[in-house]
Image (cartoon, rainbow, N blue to C red):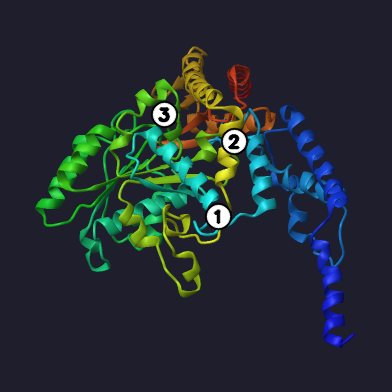
């Protein structure tokens, strides 16, 4: 055998370890499935939050060896170093931030997407994968009342969705770099920080930012918006973008979309709607009523990894103006020439910053099809009602005062102690709840006050968790009060 041939064969023998065969695959799958099942069966007794000091450090030191490791040993590392320290968002007790999901059925979709590795970035490579994603996006478009000519993208999350929305708005409005100092943008102080980040990435952070005042429920004051726009126009500026929220992160406020759409239309602004958290509430009647007017936005972001309970890593953006999205994102490189051909469907690569990408469609499609839509509608209405139930109940507990009635599923409240500093008391209360470990609440600052937030969106959260939370708050507040 010539030396080249011999070397290739010996490399191939080692390289083949990358491709386990039937029996070897089963030996890997079984322990992984067992681990997943143990995790889910033990979820109810796992603490909601474990201080970072309790693990995770050796995940950074873990060496990469030349030889193989036993899957059982690796699962042990995942267990102690990854799945133990920090927040446990798969749990029913995750009532902080905007909870994410983790549907089991999505794991099946991810498994298949990884094994078959269809190339979902361009139509030529996998027309079926691209069509499946476009079908999902069209379904989301129907849900929010967009025309069938709207285009969209399954993104990694709401942040990239906001980036695509903002960049499309910029190009549709013809905002060039020499104009940006004279091209104001309108949003409230409760807009999500990913919008500011998107503006920065897009080179738009030198646009004047007008923070529109809010009403008593932290919704954009539409009259104030119009006054600001009119004042800017009369001083010769070029207003071009208003960003509203359908479900703000802090308090779950829904900006007045019909009025904002009217103002945007009157003055030629692009109306971008950040519905990353709130958008999928449109699946239930009550949510659809609250979200009336979302169809009038020019672009909308909604996160399946929030409102459809998917595992992290899937957002969505829809844009009515197809040309604007293509202008920023479509690119024809020479080495892509085989893929050009007739394009009966837009490819994700033409509509987003990504080229090669995770076939996210399958992890969305699988749970929607396996479960049907009914449990999603029920879960979303249940979450709306759980937030209202909590809001009604906690204000009957002596000492607690509540923020505005929840529009969606976020409720803000705080304890007013008999004496002493309320902010410090509530910070202690949040810590005490965290240390108990059965539920996780987050806090924020609203109007300079420390407030506690309860955000209901984890699909495993039901009435028993909310009752437990009320009981815990009552008892922990009494303990801290007695301690003072
Ligand atoms: C979560 C959220 C975002 C950011 O989305 P990611 O999926 O975390 O990138 C943007 N806006 C709102 C209102 C959100 O709730």
Q: In percent of the image, x 68 and y 32: which residue is there?
A: 435
Question: Label 3's element?
Answer: helix
Q: x%, y% of residue 267?
A: 16, 46
Residue where numbered disc 3 is placed = 282
Residue 259 - label: none
Of the image marks 1 and 3, the number of the one nearer the N terminus: 1
How many residues crowd mark 2 within 10 Å: few (<14), some (14–19), many (20+)? Answer: many
Of the image marks 2 and 3, the number of the one nearer the N terminus: 2
Question: Label 1's element?
Answer: loop
Q: x%, y% of residue 47?
A: 71, 33
Q: Is residue 355 left or right of residue 268?
A: right
| Quadrant of the rendered image containing residue 408 | top left
Give the mark toward the camera: 1 or 2: 1
Label 2 CB sits under 8 Å from any ligand 1 atom: no
How many residues crowd mark 1 within 10 Å: few (<14), some (14–19), many (20+)? Answer: some
Q: x%, y% of residue 106?
A: 63, 39
Of the image marks 1 and 2, the number of the one nearer the N terminus: 2
Give the mark toward the camera: 1 or 3: 1
Residue where numbered disc 2 is placed = 101
| Quadrant of the rendered image containing residue 198 | bottom left
């Amino acid at each position: 055998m010539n030396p080249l041939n011999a070397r290739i064969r010996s490399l191939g023998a080692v390289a083949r370890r990358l491709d386990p065969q039937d029996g070897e695959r089963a030996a890997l799958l079984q322990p992984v499935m067992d681990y997943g099942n143990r995790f889910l069966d033990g979820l109810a007794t796992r603490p909601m939050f474990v201080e970072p000091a309790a693990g995770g450090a050796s995940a950074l030191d873990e060496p990469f060896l030349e030889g193989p490791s036993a899957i059982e040993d690796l699962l042990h590392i995942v267990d102690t170093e990854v799945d133990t320290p920090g927040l446990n968002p798969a749990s029913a007790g995750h009532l902080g931030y905007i909870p994410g999901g983790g549907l089991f059925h999505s794991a099946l979709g991810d498994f298949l997407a990884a094994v078959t590795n269809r190339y979902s970035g361009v139509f030529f490579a996998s027309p079926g994968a691209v069509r499946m994603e476009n079908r999902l996006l069209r379904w989301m478009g129907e849900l929010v009342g967009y025309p069938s000519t709207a285009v969209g993208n399954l993104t990694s999350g709401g942040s990239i969705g906001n980036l695509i929305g903002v960049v499309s708005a910029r190009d549709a409005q013809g905002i060039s770099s020499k104009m940006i100092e004279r091209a104001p943008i309108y949003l409230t102080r409760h807009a999500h920080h990913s919008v500011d980040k998107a503006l920065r990435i897009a080179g738009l952070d030198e646009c004047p930012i007008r923070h529109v005042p809010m009403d008593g429920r932290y919704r954009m004051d539409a009259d104030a918006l119009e006054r600001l726009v009119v004042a800017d126009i009369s001083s010769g500026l070029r207003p071009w973008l208003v960003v509203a929220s359908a479900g703000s992160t802090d308090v779950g406020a829904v900006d007045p979309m019909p009025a904002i759409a009217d103002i945007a239309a009157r003055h030629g602004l692009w109306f971008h709607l950040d519905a990353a958290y709130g958008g999928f509430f449109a699946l239930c009647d009550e949510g659809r009523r609250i979200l009336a007017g979302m169809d009038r936005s020019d672009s909308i972001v909604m996160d399946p990894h929030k409102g459809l309970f998917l595992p992290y890593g899937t957002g969505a953006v829809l844009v009515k103006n197809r040309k604007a999205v293509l202008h920023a994102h479509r690119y024809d490189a020479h080495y892509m020439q085989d893929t050009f051909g007739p394009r009966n469907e837009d490819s994700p690569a033409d509509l987003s910053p990504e080229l090669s990408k995770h076939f996210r469609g399958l992890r969305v499609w699988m749970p929607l099809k396996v479960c049907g839509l009914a449990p999603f509608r029920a879960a979303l209405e249940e979450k709306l009602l759980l937030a209202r139930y909590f809001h009604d109940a906690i204000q009957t507990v002596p000492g607690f005062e509540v923020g505005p009635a929840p529009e969606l599923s976020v409720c803000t409240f705080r304890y007013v102690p008999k004496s002493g500093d309320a902010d410090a008391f509530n910070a202690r209360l949040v810590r005490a709840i965290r240390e108990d470990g059965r539920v996780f609440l987050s806090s924020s600052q609203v109007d300079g006050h420390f407030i506690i937030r309860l955000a209901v969106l984890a699909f495993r959260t039901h009435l028993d968790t909310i009752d437990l939370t009320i009981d815990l708050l009552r008892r922990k507040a009494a303990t801290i009060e007695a301690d003072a």
